[in-house]
Image (spheres, grey):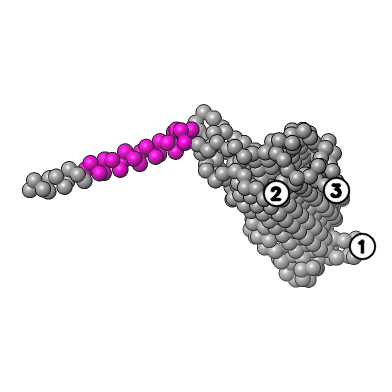
């Protein structure tokens, strides 16, 4: 009998210890995360041409011999960090710079580029992994990474990168004469993958992306992309002379393309619209001015999976737009 009481007593002690440990872990993780945090030491901060000397990267910054930031792993998957941070910041420089073959993990922003004074920035063959961090009560709280933000810049080339994980996507703001091509973008937030604001002369091509939003921009070419799985596929507001061709819009849960009232002279043809906005009447929406949903040169429009036996395709919206020459099969 005494032996049984001892066993029960030991069992109670073990359960009590386990309970205390579990409560401690929860408190540390949710209430006192600042006790165990990751302090990052390998971030890169360039705010002038002279800052490149600190890092001893190859290249001198000329067009023929650009500075190369390559083959680095920067960041952390640990969700408890001391403060918000940027993995790579480049601003106020006139140099030509290449960022390639790097793995960029987490951060408030993985790459921030802005206020350039010339030169060029190429971001290619990198992998970006978004992480939702927690900085503790009374601080920033939860925040989610931007894969990159590029602002007040020109001659930016973003190519052959993969973007995945917890993120709100990426932003081009006041960017000119630049390109975003051959990238794969998947955001767990199901948010717009790429936002474009106040930009001119951009090429957006051959990407796999979950949504693109464009505002206050003109002279953009959006071609040969696959846009899928987002609420709207392509949002266009207050733009002029946008060319949208040979894209595939697939399984967008809202309109595949939505043109707002201040969009003008948008030309849309040779695209494939496959099973978008399936609870609605049309896969696209247009309330803009003088937008055209077919090629006036070739007299060819777009492929619509719900065309049925109709001879043309009606677009929702106050513009009263019609694709007069829908295609019988994807182009």
Q: Residue 225 appears in which quarter of the rendering?
A: bottom right
Residue drawn at x 23%, y 41% as measured from the top left: 13
Image spot of residue 204 (x, y percent): 78, 53
Q: Residue 59 appears in which quarter of the rendering?
A: top right
Residue at disc 3, secondary structure? loop
Quickly name the residue at label 1: 297
Q: Residue 143 appears in which quarter of the rendering?
A: top right
Quickly name the residue at label 2: 70
Q: Is residue 252 magenta?
A: no
Specify start and end residues of the magenta stretch as a single range.
12-36
Residue at disc 2, secondary structure? strand
Residue at disc 1, secondary structure? loop
Image spot of residue 201 (x, y percent): 85, 47
Up-down relation of residue 272 to residue 19 (above or below): below
Q: Is residue 15 magenta?
A: yes
Q: Is residue 49 left or right of residue 23?
A: right
**Viewer-proximal residue among 176 and 295:** 176
Image spot of residue 313 (x, y percent): 78, 62
Residue drawn at x 76%, y 68% as measured from the top left: 330
Looking at the image, tell me whether mark 2 or mark 3 is earlier in sequence order.
3
Is there CB contact under 8 Å for labels 2 and 1? no
Dot 1: within a 10 Å radius of its alpha carbon, few (fewer than 14), some, or many (20 or more) residues?
Answer: few
Using the image, tell me which numbered label, if any, was put on residue 64.
3
Measure the C-alpha gap from mark 3 to mark 1: 41 Å
Dot 3: within a 10 Å radius of its alpha carbon, few (fewer than 14), some, or many (20 or more) residues?
Answer: few
Up-down relation of residue 39 to residue 227 (above or below): above
Q: Is residue 225 visible?
A: yes
Measure the C-alpha gap from mark 2 to mark 1: 45 Å
């Amino acid at each position: 009998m005494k032996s049984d009481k001892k066993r029960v007593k030991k069992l109670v002690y073990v359960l009590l210890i386990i309970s205390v440990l579990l409560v401690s872990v929860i408190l540390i993780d949710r209430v006192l995360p600042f006790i165990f945090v990751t302090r990052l030491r390998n971030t890169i901060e360039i705010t002038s041409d002279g800052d490149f000397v600190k890092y001893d990267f190859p290249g001198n910054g000329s067009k023929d011999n650009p500075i190369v930031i390559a083959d680095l792993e920067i960041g952390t998957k640990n969700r408890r960090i001391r403060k918000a941070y940027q993995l790579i910041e480049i601003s106020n420089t006139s140099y030509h710079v290449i960022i390639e073959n790097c793995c960029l993990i987490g951060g408030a922003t993985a790459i921030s580029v802005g206020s350039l004074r010339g030169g060029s920035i190429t971001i290619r063959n990198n992998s970006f992994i978004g992480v939702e961090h927690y900085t503790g009560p009374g601080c920033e709280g939860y925040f989610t990474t931007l894969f990159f933000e590029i602002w007040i810049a020109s001659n930016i080339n973003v190519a052959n990168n993969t973007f995945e994980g917890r993120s709100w996507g990426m932003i081009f703001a006041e960017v000119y004469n630049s390109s975003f091509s051959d990238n794969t973008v998947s955001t767990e937030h199901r948010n717009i993958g790429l936002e474009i604001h106040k930009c001119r002369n951009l090429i957006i091509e051959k990407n796999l992306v979950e949504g693109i939003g464009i505002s206050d921009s003109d002279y953009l070419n959006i071609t040969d992309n696959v846009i899928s799985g987002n609420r709207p596929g392509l949002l266009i507001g207050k733009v002029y002379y946008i060319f949208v061709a040979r894209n595939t819009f697939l399984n967008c849960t809202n309109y595949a393309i939505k043109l707002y009232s201040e969009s003008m002279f948008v030309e849309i043809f040779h695209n494939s619209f496959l099973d978008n906005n399936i609870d609605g009447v049309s896969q696209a929406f247009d309330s803009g001015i003088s937008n055209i949903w077919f090629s006036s040169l070739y007299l060819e429009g777009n492929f619509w999976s719900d065309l049925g036996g109709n001879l043309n395709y009606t677009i929702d919206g106050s513009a009263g737009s019609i694709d007069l020459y829908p295609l019988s099969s994807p182009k």
